[in-house]
Amino acid sequence: MVRSSSWGERLGFMVGLILLGCVHQGTDSEPFGDGAWMPHAEQAAETRYDSDRPALDGYVPSREPDDRPDVTVYGYWPYWGESLGTLPWDQLTHVALFGVELTEDGTLAQTHRWTKHAQDALQFGGSHDVRIHLTLISFADDVQASVLTDPERRARAISELSALLDAEGGHGLNIDIEGLDNDLKEDFVTFVEECSAAFDEVVVAMPAIDWSGSYDYDALSNASDGLFIMGYGYHWSGGSPGPIAPLYGGGVWGERSLSWSVEDYRAYGATDDKIILGLPLYGRQWGTRGEAVPGSATSEGSAVTYSAALPVAQEKGRSWDAQTYTPYTFPSASEQLWYDDAESLEAKMGYAVDEGLQGFGFWALTYDDGDPDLWGRVDALTHAGR
């Protein structure tokens, strides 16, 4: 199906916002300046744990090995995260190790991010039948244009990915190509089809809003085992403060939201059994001109992990935006922190389950410090009647 989110439609939408004087207001503001939806790229560039941060204890499962979640629970584990031994393996169905980098000639770089950790992931996940995926990442236009348009370079990339997966015994591939140009739309579908022919499982990271119409929802749905909607970044670091993963839109926030994105995917041919709703285990803190909501930013928003946001809200006071199901707090009179906690994520996970989607997932595992409140709610939602 041909998507209608063309550059013409996008231009008309932006002109309308300009006339209304609200280009950067709410979730209708365009992310990342050039129309790209690149939350993992942005996080990889800015988010690191401090070296003196105390190590987490190992996780103690609450479910028996054969008692798996009823729906997909898909988590990305970043190479800068806490030990794989701290993950709630009994509450997950898939863990994607982030991430091996694609280069211009189709070869792979940073492969140690996979080879160093794959065996640990397979060992920890094995008793609960968690599927371990290798994440292929590309955030650069020149790399994507070079590889996706060239059959030999695509084949080289697939061959090297296959060698990495076979050597370690991984179960599948996560394709995380962000900021895709519109003229590579068909080439990307071809690449995903070729990957699906080569690997048992293929999941594709997808934008919550495809501003340039670069991702062919129905073709990619047909070609893959799942579309992981990166359902965060509705308010991004360079924009105005607000909920980064609003469940519903409306009011001062505009219409774009998680539920809007799901309906957009459905409208353009993605089937519910392929949609995985990605949710954030992080928030953003902006400098502002006061405590007005919506606010006006005086600085770029910095990422704040789930575990770092909770104590700030506990100390400063937790506010709640009922329209978007999002908590927020004021670290100072000139700062706003919008984040997600166990209550807000329960509503968003529950939405995915109630809508009959394949499931939900998280960017990124260990950002929550293994919060028992959060994972207890995951357990209750994904083990119906048990």
Image (tube, rainbow, N blue to C red):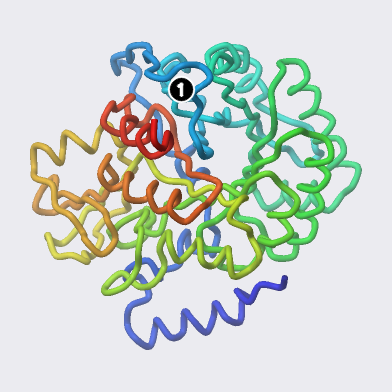
Give the residue number, with chain letter if any, for mark 1: 90
Residue that sits furthest to the bottom in the current view: 19
Residue that sits furthest to the front in the current view: 385
Image coordinates for residue 373, horizontal then vertical, percent: 26, 31
**Quarter of the image with the C terminus in it:** top left
- Tally the numbered discs: 1
The crowding category of the residue bearing disc 1, from other C-alpha atoms within 10 Å (few below 14, some 14 to 19, many at least 20), is many
Image coordinates for residue 126, horizontal then vertical, percent: 58, 15
Looking at the rendered structure, the kind of residue marked 1 is Asp
Residue 252 picture quarter: bottom left
Residue sitting at x 28%, y 46%: 339
Image coordinates for residue 182, horizontal then vertical, percent: 69, 65
Residue that sits furthest to the right in the current view: 152
Q: Is residue 298 left or right of residue 21?
A: left
Q: Is residue 304 left or right of residue 322?
A: right
**Quarter of the image with the N terminus in it:** bottom right
Q: Nearer the viewer, residue 316 or 125?
A: 125
Residue sitting at x 39%, y 46%: 349
Residue 212 picture quarter: bottom right
Q: Is residue 179 above or below residue 340?
A: below
Q: Is residue 121 above or below residue 22?
A: above
Residue 346 picture quarter: top left
Image coordinates for residue 333, horizontal then vertical, percent: 9, 53
Residue sitting at x 61%, y 82%: 8
Q: Secondary structure at mark 1?
A: helix
Residue sitting at x 8%, y 42%: 316
Q: Nearer the viewer, residue 100 or 140?
A: 100
